[in-house]
Image (tube, rainbow, N blue to C red):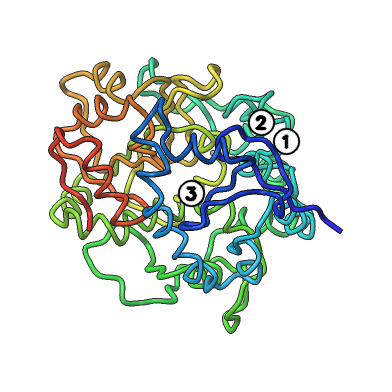
Amino acid sequence: METVTVACSVCAKEIPEDQALYCSQCKALFYCSDKCRTTDWISPDNPDHSHQQWCSKMKDFMDFEPILQKLPFTFAPITTAADFTQFKLDEILSHFGVNRQGLWKYEFCSNSHHFQISPGGDLPLFSDLWTTTTMDSEKLSPVTLSSSSSYEDALFRAFVSPSLAVIMSLSPLYDSPAPDLQDPSLVNINLRNWLDYYKWRGLCSPDEESISNPLALLLHWPLTLYHIVAHKLPQINPFCIPKILINRKLIIHVIGVEKELSLLPVFKELDHLFKPQLRIYIYFIGRHFDVAADRVVYHLSSRLSVSVWGGLYHEFLHTQKPTSELPDLIIGFNAGLAAYPTWPLTLSSIAVGRFAQETQKLKIYCATVIINIRLTYLV
């Protein structure tokens, strides 16, 4: 029988769950001893991050568990349960034959590979999925890299499962399962949820109401970006949509990038989701990835590129020419605005900022952290 272990929230020591102490109020954190529990409660080295400050907020997050369990995936009751462990995740991924292989090992980097390879260090394995230029070069046609591997082989190395690789190599049908797409819009299709996407992409049959395919565990990155562009941007700034369509160009800055770079192949999916007349320029900006990827432009299709820049976002802004085009969106996946001391300086460099975090309560807390910065929040 599996021995379920948990990590102490202070010292990271692995302990059997039935021997661990936990916060009885939020039930979100485990501790190996009373000493660690007391230390975390007051956090003398960083009072703003003390559990005393965060306990009620963590309880709010834990209240989302029943909502997450209603996701249409057959494995959702397991992955959203309070006793979910890395062992159970390994079992699920092993069942599908993808555990710690291909892109899956970057998304779920619990083994030593994560510590040996910097984010983006393995991108040459998938080089047949794109061509490259550099941010320093003149804007010429993309240079094709020589490789002995085929496009299909690169997809197989990425997704591991032959059936998933085949599906991801094909273009979907452009019949929307939700035809009420409002114009003007930047997207091809109105996807309301994961079930809509799976049916549209041919990952499940039209009459299915539950999903066993685990591809969403990788594709949540581009689909989150799609959701922001399709459903949140029109709420934040509806007047920018016609301008983007007229210019036929969408510019997105993704900041605080780490593992997103290792998962670069999944962002090719955006080519199917956005209107075909748009050219899409995405910038990955962050400090913690392989130096070989710095200032490289990955052309994922003839109209979709990802440019990589190493450093903090406010440093990136200072390198831009006065004539450089401003982004239509600035996105930080799992940004941790309250967790890093460099965020206030970065946010102060943005003239008008709009951002969303996991819950409204967290947004309010982030507002207190950067109280001197004038921002408009997405409600």
* Vertical placement of residue 280 versus 298, above or below: below
| Residue under the point 82% across and 55% down | 2
> Circle 3 is placed at which residue position?
221
> Circle 1 is placed at which residue position?
111
Horizontal side of residue 111 vs 124, given as left or right = right
Q: Position of residue 195 (x, y in %)?
A: 52, 72
Q: Residue furthest bottom?
A: 207
**Image quadrant for the C terminus?**
bottom left
Amino acid carrying mark 3 in the image: Trp
Badge 2 crowding class, 10 Å Cα cut-off, few under 14, some 14 to 19, many 20 or more, is some
| Residue under the point 44% across and 40% down | 41
The total of numbered circles placed on residues is 3
Point out the tag, 2 or 3, that comes first from the N-terminus: 2
What secondary structure is marked by label 2? helix
Horizontal side of residue 79 vs 15, given as left or right = left
| Residue under the point 61% across and 55% down | 168
* Vertical placement of residue 16 versus 92, above or below: above
Given this view, does label 3 or label 1 mark the residue nearer the observer? 1
Point out the tag, 3 or 1, that comes first from the N-terminus: 1
* Vertical placement of residue 122 versus 184, above or below: above
| 238 vs 356, nearest the viewer | 356
Distance Cα–Cα, label 3 vs label 1: 22 Å
| 32 vs 192, nearest the viewer | 32
Q: Position of residue 368 (x, y in %)?
A: 22, 41
Distance Cα–Cα, label 1 vs label 2: 6 Å
What secondary structure is marked by label 3? helix
> Circle 2 is placed at which residue position?
114
Distance Cα–Cα, label 2 vs label 3: 19 Å
Q: Position of residue 108 (x, y in %)?
A: 64, 44
Q: Which mark is residue 61?
A: none
Asked whether disc 1 touches disc 2, contact meaning CB atoms under 8 Å apart, the reply is yes
Displayed quadrant of residue 209: bottom right
